Image (cartoon, rainbow, N blue to C red):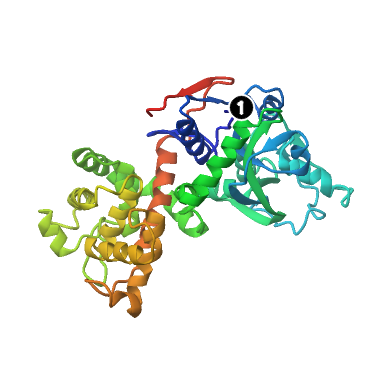
Amino acid sequence: MLTRNSPTTYYEDADGPAGIEYEMAKMFADELGVELTLLIPDSFDDLLAKISDNSAHIAAAGLTITKEREKIYRFGPPYQEIIEQFIYNVANKRPKSLSKLNGGTLEVVANSSHEERLKHLSERIPDLIWKSNHDLDSEELLQMVSDDIIDYTIADSNELSLNQRFLINLRVAFDASETQHLAWAMPKSDDNSLFLEVQKFFKRIKKSGDLTRMIERNYGHVEDFDYVGTKIFRRHIEIRLPEHQLFFENAATEYGVDWRLIAAMGYQESHWDPDAVSPTGVRGIMMLTLKTAKEMEIKDRLDPESSISGGAKYFKKTLERIDESITEPDRTWMAMAAYNVGYSHLQDARKIARKLNKNPDLWIDVKQTLPLLAKRKWYKQTRYGYARGWEPVRYVENIRSYYDILKWVDEGDAESTPAPEEFLKIPNSL
């Protein structure tokens, strides 16, 4: 299977292979009972060429279905909708349209759907000029816009969503297309066997909800980008985190959790302010209640080391209470929600999910029922009554974004990119 290294396709993180294209490819290979082999070509040009010359069975690389491509490749069922967006740096003047770029440098990935669209638009805008980059991918061009090396690029909306939290200077000037569809591409062939299996696979994961859950797991927490909040967070990573990072690391080691996850929770609670105090009396970096502090044997909630240790201990305890039927990463998101709103209210929300024929073991479903705890119609049917159920949803989604950014910063923005033409064999038992 051909793919690309990017947050929207395939990448290696601390826990191993990740990315929505990888997740789908691995699931498909498992269903076929075969070993998954990933091939990452040198460039996007090479990837397209290798689909044509039968170097791989399938390209799972975030490819947009276009009329020109359909003449060359066979596409499987669409699995995700995106919009092509014109991107600029917020420090510069926002262009109003492609005909008013004021001489700025527009650069796109060569032979991409973005260049295909520009070629089509140039028939109506004769002065439209751009540079085709044969060496860099879309994410690298976004970095160049963020660094003010080039003025503009075009990117898919899902790529921008994942990268904008790290490249906070990026903005959408305008949409460059209507809704487009992503799909797997295959060489045209008289043998329809693999194509038919791909069709069956996507029909099944759409019906089962697996596709929706994968999209939510990869994109559900990045829908609402907060420029100011993200910029402040990045500044606090530099200024406040170093003073407390060792405490997070030590507590995480003691309780067997990721220190960056606990740090993300601490930021959501207090912005890493050890003297934080709320009107309701919770205080400290982890904003522990007096009851929780006593339970965790914490004497001084305003002591950073004690607060962090108590918060990590309490989160671990909450995590252990979550039903065994709930698997990761949903298990962690549920535990976070319980940390915020209380385990009992989480259970009430799961009961509501059952009544609505949703899956109480999936965060994507429970995050829809938690806000119902604030509605009289629903909380009257629960054991523990009213709760501000929208708060744990926002709490979890914020932490997921903070956690992603902390991992990106901690790993030095250095992805484990395979060498060109390197084959990666992914065993079925992974």
187 or 268: nearer the eye?
187
Residue 219 percent coordinates (x, y): 49, 50
In this view, 113 is above or below 232: above
124 or 225: nearer the eye?
124
Residue 236 percent coordinates (x, y): 39, 51
Task: Tell me, yes or no, if residue 418 can be seen here.
Answer: yes
Q: Is residue 19 left or right of residue 181?
A: left
326 or 33: nearer the eye?
33
Q: Secondary structure at mark 1?
A: loop
Q: Is residue 219 left or right of residue 50?
A: left
Q: Is residue 212 left or right of residue 372?
A: right
244 or 6: nearer the eye?
6
Callout count: 1
**Quadrant housing the C terminus:** top left
In this view, 5 is above or below 323: above
- Category of crowding for the residue at label 1, using alpha-carbon neighbours closer than 10 angstroms: few (below 14), some (14–19), many (at least 20): some
Residue 256 percent coordinates (x, y): 23, 39
Q: Find residue 259 and report its image quarter.
A: top left
Task: Tell me, yes or no, if residue 283 can be seen here.
Answer: no
In this view, 325 is above or below 41: below
Residue 207 percent coordinates (x, y): 50, 51
**Quadrant housing the N terminus:** top right
Find disc 1 in the rendering and name its residue: 57
Q: Residue at x 61, y 31 (%)?
A: 193
Q: Residue at x 35, y 57 (%)?
A: 268
Q: Find residue 374 and report its image quarter.
A: bottom left
Give amino acid for label 1. Answer: His
